[in-house]
Amino acid sequence: MKLSKIILSLAFAGTILSGVATSASADTVTYPSTQAATNNRGTYNQTQTTQTTPTTSAATATTAATDTSAVVTLAKQLASQNIPYIWGGESLTGMDCSGLTDYVYQKAAGITLGHYTVTQESHVTKETVAAAQPGDLLFWGSQGASYHVAIYIGNNQYVAAPQPGQNVQIQTINNAFMPSFAGHVNG
């Protein structure tokens, strides 16, 4: 209990120094500043909460809105720049599928997804392809064993780094090469 109060005091002092008002109990410090955030899924309130326990230091949980319009805009721009498919690539000189998605999310939203499709699966909330919204990721293969990923841009289209010999491009979802599932990137 003493450790909890010490941690709580430190967390409280830190928030006062940063100019954020707080309300506190023995186990939780809540920052009452609520911001309205908007994304393509609607408007919601964003609250930041810090919880402390006797066994750990202060841990911060935040809900961040991902700017999906910036993700879609950058993905479309890259599709017009003749960037070749290069296995393991993640730059404007060449990209593979997971390099493309990681590059776009890093540059447009400040989110690092990792450079492997299965790693990227761990950064999304899984959904059906039919429920995909612009900015969501599309995956091919079973969950935990995906082998291809792309960025859904709306209107049944996505931006992908398809395969060697092709450039980053806009493609259309079709039955011949149907994504297996989609995922909304968690901020």
Image: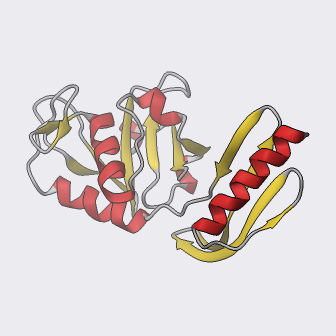
**Residue 44 shown left or right of residue 114 in the figure:** right
Depth check, front residue: 55 or 68: 55
Q: Quadrant of the N terminus?
A: top right
Depth check, front residue: 30 or 98: 30
Q: Is residue 179 above or below residue 50?
A: above
- Residue at horizontal 43%, vertical 65%? 67
- Its colouring scheme is secondary structure
The quadrant holding residue 9 is: bottom right
Depth check, front residue: 84 or 5: 5
- Residue at horizontal 67%, vertical 75%? 34
Residue 128 in view (yes/no): yes
- Residue at horizontal 70%, vertical 39%? 57
Q: Horizontal and vertical percent for residue 124? A: 55, 43
The quadrant holding residue 70 is: bottom left
Q: Horizontal and vertical percent for residue 32? A: 73, 72
Q: Is residue 39 above or below residue 186?
A: below
Q: Horizontal and vertical percent for residue 19? A: 60, 73
Residue 172 in view (yes/no): no
**Residue 19 shown left or right of residue 80 in the figure:** right
For the image shown, how many numbered marks are present on the structure? 0
Q: Horizontal and vertical percent for residue 41? A: 57, 68
**Residue 184 shown left or right of residue 79 in the figure:** right
